[in-house]
Amino acid sequence: MAQKKVIIIDDDQMTCNLIETFLRLENFETASFNQIEAEGIIPVLEREKPDIIFLDFHLGSNETLQYVTAIREDPTWNHLPIIMTSAIDYNKICRDAGANDFIVKPFNWEEVTQHINLLLSDSASQEAS
């Protein structure tokens, strides 16, 4: 089975490094970004071709809900599983915006893996139907 690719978007480089290290140990391919340029999220997805996105609620002082909206409105990427994260519980607002899941920081690494694997499994099931 081919490695699944996770892109991590978080303004804290140490958080990106930790998540990438952990996910690579779990046999995922990864790429991380500390910011999204003015071009927006869709060009990043087109370049990276991820299977799932791990998105922090804040990049600097900006909320990232507009990225979720852009992904859900794009016919190529609207199926992409999105897990959002924050140290504050924004579960409802993130899910209302279209995120599939939300995980509160600090992370329980076993929980992160379970959430990613569940969403990838659900995504594969939907594509097969």
Image: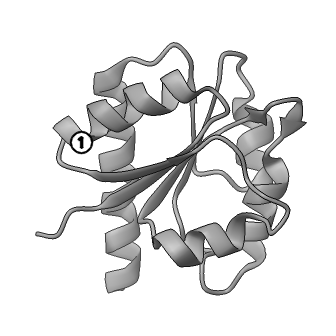
Q: Position of residue 26 (x, y in %)?
A: 19, 40
Image quadrant of residue 103? Answer: top right
Amino acid carrying label 1: it is Arg
Tell me if residue 103 comes above or below residue 87 in the rendering: below
Q: Residue at the location (35% across, 26% down)?
A: 111
Q: Residue at the location (53% across, 75% down)?
A: 47
Secondary structure under the numbered disc 1 in the rendered image: helix
Q: Position of residue 8 (x, y in %)?
A: 51, 45
**Side of 99 where 101 appears, left or right:** left
Tell me if residue 116 comes above or below residue 85 in the rendering: below
Tell me if residue 54 comes above or below residue 40 in the rendering: above
Q: Position of residue 122 (x, y in %)?
A: 37, 62
Q: Residue at the location (75% across, 28% down)?
A: 90
Residue situated in front as seen by the camera: 30 or 122:
30
Q: Which residue is mark 1?
A: 24
Image quadrant of residue 110? Answer: top left
